[in-house]
Image (cartoon, grey):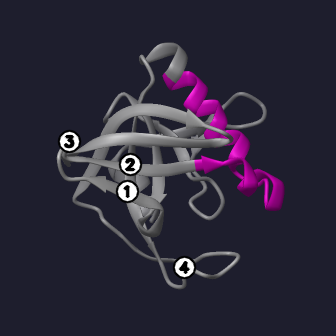
Amino acid sequence: MSQMWTRLNTYTISASGEERSVNHNNEWGGFSRYLKMPVFTGWRDHLNFDKTEKTTTALVLDQEWAERRPIGTANQERWLQWAEKNNEGIAAFFVIHAVDEAAELRKVKYIDDDKVFIGKISRDQGKVFVVGKPRQI
C-alpha cells in the first residue's frame, strides 16, 4: 500500500509539525501533492454504490474506530477538517481490500491502484464519508 501513497505523492504532519511520509500501517489519510487535496483509504466492504448518480461512497472515519483503536484517527480528522476549511469539503479516497473483513485488526490484501474517487465529505452521527466519482491516475 505504500506504493499508492508514493504514487499520489502523499505526506502527513508529525507531532512536531514537520512533513513526513504517511505510515501505511496505522494511518489512513494524508495530503496528496499530486491531487492537491487530502486522500484517504476506503475498505471495499465499507463502500456504497449509487448507479444512478455514478458515485461511490466510502466510510473514511468512524468514531467507533477511535474508541476501539485510536491510532491514526486523529490524523484522518486533521485532513478532513483541512478539506472542509480549505477545499470546499472535497477529498479523495482509494479502495483497499481486506484479507479478512471480519478481523478486528485488518490486513490489506490488495489495493485498487488504477483510480481514486474524488468528492464531497459528508458527516453523519460520528461517521465520515467521501461521496466520490472515479478518476484514473
Q: Residue flagged by tag 2: what amino acid is it?
A: Thr
What is the span of residues highlighted in magenta in the rendered image?
A: 61-83
Q: Secondary structure at mark 4?
A: loop
- At horizontal 40% and vertical 30% (from top left) the residue drawn is 37
Please report the residue visible at 59 percent of the width from the left and 37 percent of the height from the top: 124
Q: Quadrant of residue 67?
A: bottom right
The first of marks 1 and 3 along the sequence is 1
Residue that badge 3 annotates:
53
| Disc 3: CA contacts within 10 A as few (<14), some (14-19) or many (>=20) | few
Would you say residue 33 is visible in this rendering? Answer: no
Query: Relative to 97, is 53 above or below?
Result: above
Residue 61: x and y in percent read 60, 47
Q: Is residue 92 above or below residue 62?
A: above
Q: Position of residue 45 (x, y in %)?
A: 45, 69
Disc 1 secondary structure class: strand
| Labels 2 and 4: the sequence-earlier one | 2
Residue wearing tag 2: 57
Rounded to the nearest whole Å, what is the CA distance between mark 3 and mark 4? 27 Å
> Looking at numbered disc 3 in the image, what kind of residue is underneath it?
Glu
Residue at the disc numbered 1: 48
For residue 42, side relative to residue 95 (left or right): right
- Residue underneath mark 4: 101
Between discs 3 and 4, the one toward the N terminus:
3
Q: State which tag comes first along the sequence, 1 or 4.
A: 1
Asked if labels 4 and 1 touch by Cβ distance under 8 angstroms, the answer is no
* Foreground tag (3 vs 4): 3
* Main SS class of the magenta portion in the image: helix
What separation in Å lies between label 2 and label 4 (alpha carbons)? 18 Å
